[in-house]
Amino acid sequence: MEKNGGQIKGILAFITTDKDRYLGGDPLSLLAKDQEEVVEFSEAIAEAFLADILELKSGDYLIIKK
């Protein structure tokens, strides 16, 4: 059983293709050129940090650590 009960410890990255939703700062925010690049960035970051990928209804992605 997980000690944290499945709660999110932190957001590692936010990835979007919409320059109006790209704010920069902490956590890491990336502006991708297209949806394919969003997926590529997400998979690479999640693999490197052993994290989970959460796709938002907007098409943006969050990389989260549980």
Image (cartoon, helix red, strand yellow):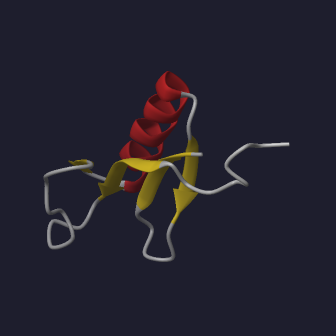
Residue 44: x, y in percent?
A: 46, 29
Residue sitting at 15 percent across and 73 percent down? 20
Residue 65: x, y in percent?
A: 53, 43
Say which quarter of the image contains residue 59.
Answer: bottom left
Q: Is 27 on the left or on the right of 50, as rendered?
A: left
Say which quarter of the image contains residue 22.
Answer: bottom left
Residue sitting at 60 percent across and 46 percent down? 66
Q: Is residue 58 above or below residue 41?
A: below
Task: Check the image and name the residue furthest to the top.
Answer: 48
* Nearer to us in this view, 9 or 23: 9
Residue sitting at 67 percent across and 49 percent down? 4
Q: Is 3 on the left or on the right of 18, as rendered?
A: right
* Nearer to us in this view, 2 or 57: 2
Residue 55: x, y in percent?
A: 53, 62
Residue 3: x, y in percent?
A: 73, 43
* Nearer to us in this view, 50 or 44: 50
Residue sitting at 86 percent across and 42 percent down? 1
